[in-house]
């Protein structure tokens, strides 16, 4: 199983870009990063986070951590800012032609499709985190915090969750993961709840690609789901 490095940009004394509303880039990148970690771990993928709280971590320490942990891929999360009324999503790589570009194109397509933001494309930049990590790395610029409309979106947990899901989908496509996204939950009244328990590893779909949302659960299935929940809550289970 792959090991993914997630790098929520900025943190601590470095807020990153700041919106007119006061929203800080460091908070958006951390929220998306933590949600992405949950999705990946729910899929059985190991995750290394460069930070899990509001703390200062230097670029050198971030790259060194990922290299020491020998992650397979690095996803760096940022939000753009500009003096002009710009608004688009873009994904940066160090150089074209490699695995990072393949991953970046998949993530970029998912982000643009989910947000409806203009497509800024896959771009090249000599960013430290892209250059100094040993394995393929991409840096996702999740819209422009300087755009008041985008900033309002980025401040909502629903949009933060959605961004995490889109990046997860791009990663999953890259990893050729069996996405186990059931085809019979769209539009169901419990769709959100079903997605949540699946992402958290509490319940799963059937191998034939269905979840069968209206099928009765046996007492054993209920016990199994609750046991998974207890495990998530770090209770001692037998
Ligand atoms: Zn940034």
Image (tube, rainbow, N blue to C red):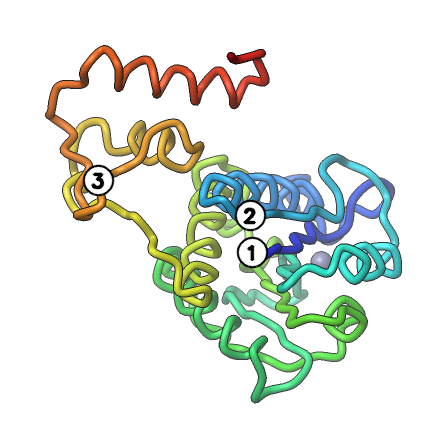
Q: State yes or no: discs 3 and 2 in contact (Cβ < 8 Å).
A: no
Horizontally, residue 14 falls left or right of residue 217, namely right
Q: State yes or no: discs 1 and 2 in contact (Cβ < 8 Å).
A: yes
Q: Position of residue 119 (x, y in %)?
A: 44, 72
The vertical placement of 96 against 37, above or below, is: below
Q: Position of residue 199 (x, y in %)?
A: 41, 37
The vertical placement of 9 against 160, above or below, is: below
Mark 3 element type: loop
The vertical placement of 113 against 192, above or below, is: below
In-front residue for pair 91/100: 100
> What residue is shown with label 1?
147
Give the residue at x 64% y 82%: 124
Mark 2 element type: helix
> What residue is shown with label 3?
206
Mark 1 element type: loop
Q: Pointer 3: residues within 10 angstroms few (<14), some, or many (20+)?
A: few
Give the spatial CA distance, label 3 vs label 2.
39 Å
Horizontally, residue 166 falls left or right of residue 74, namely left
């Amino acid at each position: 199983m792959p090991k993914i490095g997630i790098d929520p940009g900025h943190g601590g004394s470095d807020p990153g870009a700041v919106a007119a509303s006061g929203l800080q880039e460091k908070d958006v990148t951390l929220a998306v990063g933590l949600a992405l970690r949950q999705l990946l771990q729910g899929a059985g993928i190991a995750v290394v986070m460069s930070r899990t709280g509001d703390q200062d971590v230097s670029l050198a320490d971030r790259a060194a951590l990922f290299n020491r942990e020998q992650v397979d891929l690095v996803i760096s999360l940022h939000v753009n800012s500009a003096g002009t009324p710009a608004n688009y999503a873009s994904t940066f790589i160090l150089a074209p032609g490699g695995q990072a570009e393949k991953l970046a194109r998949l993530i970029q397509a998912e982000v643009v499709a989910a947000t409806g933001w203009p497509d800024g494309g896959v771009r090249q930049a000599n960013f430290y985190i892209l250059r100094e990590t040993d394995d393929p790395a991409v840096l996702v610029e999740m819209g422009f915090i300087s755009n008041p409309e985008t900033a309002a979106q980025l401040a909502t947990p629903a949009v933060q969750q959605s961004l995490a899901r889109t990046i997860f989908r791009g990663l999953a496509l890259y990893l050729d993961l069996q996405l186990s996204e059931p085809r019979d939950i769209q539009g169901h009244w419990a769709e959100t709840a079903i997605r949540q328990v699946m992402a958290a590893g509490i319940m799963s779909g059937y191998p034939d690609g269905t979840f069968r949302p209206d099928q009765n659960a046996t007492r054993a299935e209920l016990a199994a789901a609750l046991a998974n929940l207890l495990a998530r809550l770090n209770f001692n289970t037998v």
